[in-house]
Amino acid sequence: MAILVLFDIDGTLVDCGAASGKGFSKAFHEAFGVPCPIFAPADVAGFTDSAILAEVVSRLGLQCDDFEQRRALAFEIYARNLAREFQTLPPRELPGAASAVRAVRSMPGLAVGLLTGSTAATARIKLESAGIDFRQFVCGAYSEDAGSRGALPAVARARFVDLFGQEPRRTILIGDTPLDVEAAHASGSDFIGVTTGHYDRAALERAGAEIVFDDLTETEPLCRAIEELRRN
């Protein structure tokens, strides 16, 4: 395996609707004992869950001696909340997502993983609830691995090394937000954008994206773009 391709989840593979925000707010209230401020989805698009929680704590001016324990409890409750919400209103697979992952996995010399602001537990719940097999992703980097998205590619690459005994020759991130673009560029990774989240083509291109698709329905152009990046 020479190339590591990392898919984002929210806005790239699935749309959880309002369930993520509702579940997070309830979990924060239960763990910290105070109501969670309301964020517009675009205000936190691309943030890791850890970064969102830290921003909430900062806005509220909370000081907790047991912050780490409360944060862990909040994420545990959040996962349970999502699983319960998704029983009645499951997340929607975004156009072409599952077939795109399968197509990329079929390319020789590629390993497919996840790079997401979700925790590992909620990543699994989101994907499985949308009908996308979590087990097909060989490695990943999640919210609990680092506070900022920009630090996650290095975590994913380290897990690739653990699996295959060598560094990936190239890492490609597939995502939907300017923060995904920034994470790719800051880590020396390539980036492929999709406009299925809160940002249009112009916004992603302003952030530095050179390859942007409307969605993942056309697998041949996606695989061709990956192949061209591999050759560079």
Image: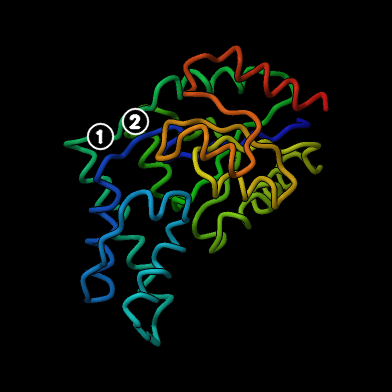
Q: Is residue 216 above or below residue 112?
A: above
**Inter-mark Cα distance, 1 to 2:** 6 Å
Circle 1 Cα neighbour tier, 10 Å, few/some/many (<14 / 14–19 / ≥20) = many
Residue at which label 1 appears: 90
Question: Circle 2 — which element?
Answer: loop
Whichever of labels 1 and 2 marks the residue nearer the N terminus, that label is 1
Residue 140 got which mark?
none
Snapshot quadrant of residue 39: bottom left
Q: Is residue 141 above or below residue 56?
A: above
Q: Disc 1 marks which amino acid?
A: Pro
Residue at x 70%, y 52% (from the top left corner): 186
Q: Position of residue 96 (x, y in %)?
A: 44, 19
Q: Disc 2 marks which amino acid?
A: Ala
Q: Position of residue 59 (x, y in %)?
A: 35, 75
Residue at x 64%, y 18% (from the top left corner): 223
**In this picture, residue 66 sits left or right of residue 87:** right
Residue at x 28%, y 67% (from the top left corner): 28
Tell which of 160 and 55 is nearer to you. Answer: 55
Residue at which label 2 appears: 130
